[in-house]
Amino acid sequence: EEITWTYTGLVGQTEWSEYFPDCAGNAQSPVEVVTTQTKYDPSLLPLTPLGYSQHGNKPFAMYNNGHTAVIELPEWMGLGGLPWLYTAVQMHLHWGSGGPSHGGGEHTVNGMSADAELHVVHYNSELYPNMSKAMTQSDGLAVLGILIVTGEETNLAFNNILNYLGRIRHADQKVFIPAFDVQTLLPEDLGRYFRYNGSLTTPPCHQSVTWTLFNERIQISPAQLLKLETILYSSKAEDPDRMLLQDNYRTTQPLNHRVVFASFS
Ligand code: 1SD
Ligand code: ZN
């Protein structure tokens, strides 16, 4: 049986490394991006989501793993524009508890926190047979990070997820949701992004992730943020002292020797 880690409390983020040694590594995620300290790399071409819009008619499985809501993605979805082909595995979210402008995103830019953050996780399917083999290799994973902020308008693409969270309120619950065009969740500008080498932001914190953080943020409405922040529980239904699943973001980690590259100047 695995150690049950949390964001705060007994096995909170400052204790993760006692049980998951990689969490004390020197190339951890998330990081703060200081734009004046990024290095322009003209070889960073626009990312190409492959098959993101071809969802077919097969529903997506979505489940509450006690840490976030995970949406499994079909294996024909992938990522081009990197040295290898990466196959999509799942996407999930990180969020806060205080409403707009109170944090919830993982990566920060010039000291500013987003309200939430979407991660689309892919593994290097040219070199490794599956996600679990890839996640321990330095070139194993590619994760897209999309910062989410609050704006006036309702984000209709986001409702493809939000509308079904009520069916997985408790840990281990699972629901099938209608397939949808995942590209509609991404920002329009896929050409401007930050790139660095980092880690999973959750235990076991393996340093296996080529991170892409888009410069453009996506927007959701205050009502959508409120729903995201107050609908899921980190515990099972039968748990007498159920805890809302909130503030499931890791604080930024030291950059140490690393450079954050920018695809734009
Ligand atoms: O938090 C996720 C975790 O749920 C899992 O999906 C892992 C990949 O196996 O990735 C991390 S994260 O770094 O994408 N936040
Ligand atoms: Zn994540």
Image: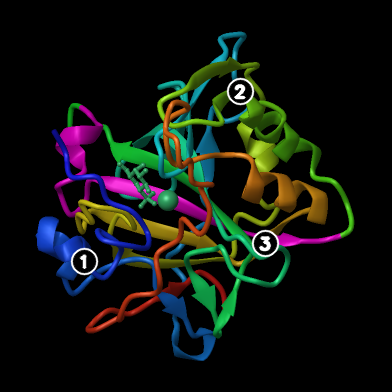
Question: Gap in Å between the C-alphas at discs 2 and 3?
Answer: 28 Å
* SS for callout 1: loop
Which amino acid type corresponds to the residue marked 3 in the rendered image? Arg
Q: Secondary structure at mark 2?
A: helix
Q: Earlier in the sequence, mark 1 or mark 2?
A: 1
Q: How is the image coloured?
A: rainbow
Amino acid carrying mark 1 in the image = Glu
- Residue 195: give x, y in percent of width and height: 41, 66
The outermost residue toward the right is 152
| Residue 254, image quadrant | bottom left
Region of the chain picked out in magenta, as a range: 130-151
The first of marks 2 and 3 along the sequence is 2
Q: Where is mark 1, residue-wise?
A: 15
Question: How much space separates mark 1 and mark 2, taking CA atoms?
Answer: 32 Å
> Neighbour class for label 3 at 10 Å: few (<14), some, many (≥20)?
some
Q: Is residue 55 magenta?
A: no
What residue sits right under mark 3 in the picture? Answer: 217
